[in-house]
Image: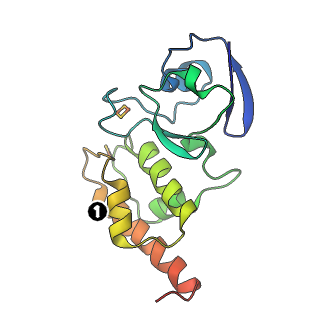
Amino acid sequence: MVSLIVNGARREIDAPTDEPLAYVLRNRLGLPGTKVACGLEQCGACLVTVDGECRYACTLPVGECADRSVTTVEGLGGDGLHPVQRALLDFNAAQCGYCLSGILVRAAALFDADPAPSPAQIREALAPQLCRCGAQPRVLRALETLARDAASQEGRP
Ligand code: FES
Ligand code: FES
């Protein structure tokens, strides 16, 4: 039995402690937003945060998350949408969408730390996130616009 907090709610899970977190989320907790693609920490599709730190759920044993706080794409915006989710929707920044959960988790962590990152910071943060459809240019445009709007609201140059 493993006890952890998922998207703000404590969950008790009857799973082997070495089961990857991504399978626990998808198959035991009914949270399919976390995707599994490579299973090798190479693509970022499975990204979640654990105590605010980005982690690859495809390889992370659930036992390592005991009593820690896990946030998946389903929990990003609380009751509404996180600003990065709204930005990608506004720019229609997706094709198949398989990569988007990880991209959104990574982008939300970046924008939660600083609502107005530079274009270089956005590109560097998203570099590990692969998209086979080629949606990256629209994703970057969406996030750069979000950051520019936040900077101008804060009176940054
Ligand atoms: S599925 Fe985890 S990094 Fe690709
Ligand atoms: S939109 Fe298809 S993999 Fe990114």
Number of labelled discs?
1
The quadrant where residue 112 appears: bottom right
Using the image as rendered, state which of residue 33 and residue 90 is in the foreground.
33
Vertical relation: 72 (above or below) 29: below
Q: Quadrant of the N terminus?
A: top right
User: For ligand 1, which image quadrant applies?
Assistant: top left
Q: Residue 15: x percent and y percent?
A: 60, 11
Name the residue rendered at 51%, 86% in the picture.
Answer: 156
In the figure, is residue 37 to the left or right of 86?
A: left
Q: Farthest right residue?
A: 10
Vertical relation: 54 (above or below) 77: above
What residue would you read off at disc 1?
137
In the figure, is residue 79 to the left or right of 104?
A: right
Which amino acid lies under the numbered mark 1 shown in the image of this protein? Pro
Name the residue rendered at 52%, 54% in the picture.
Answer: 109
Name the residue rendered at 42%, 66% in the picture.
Answer: 143
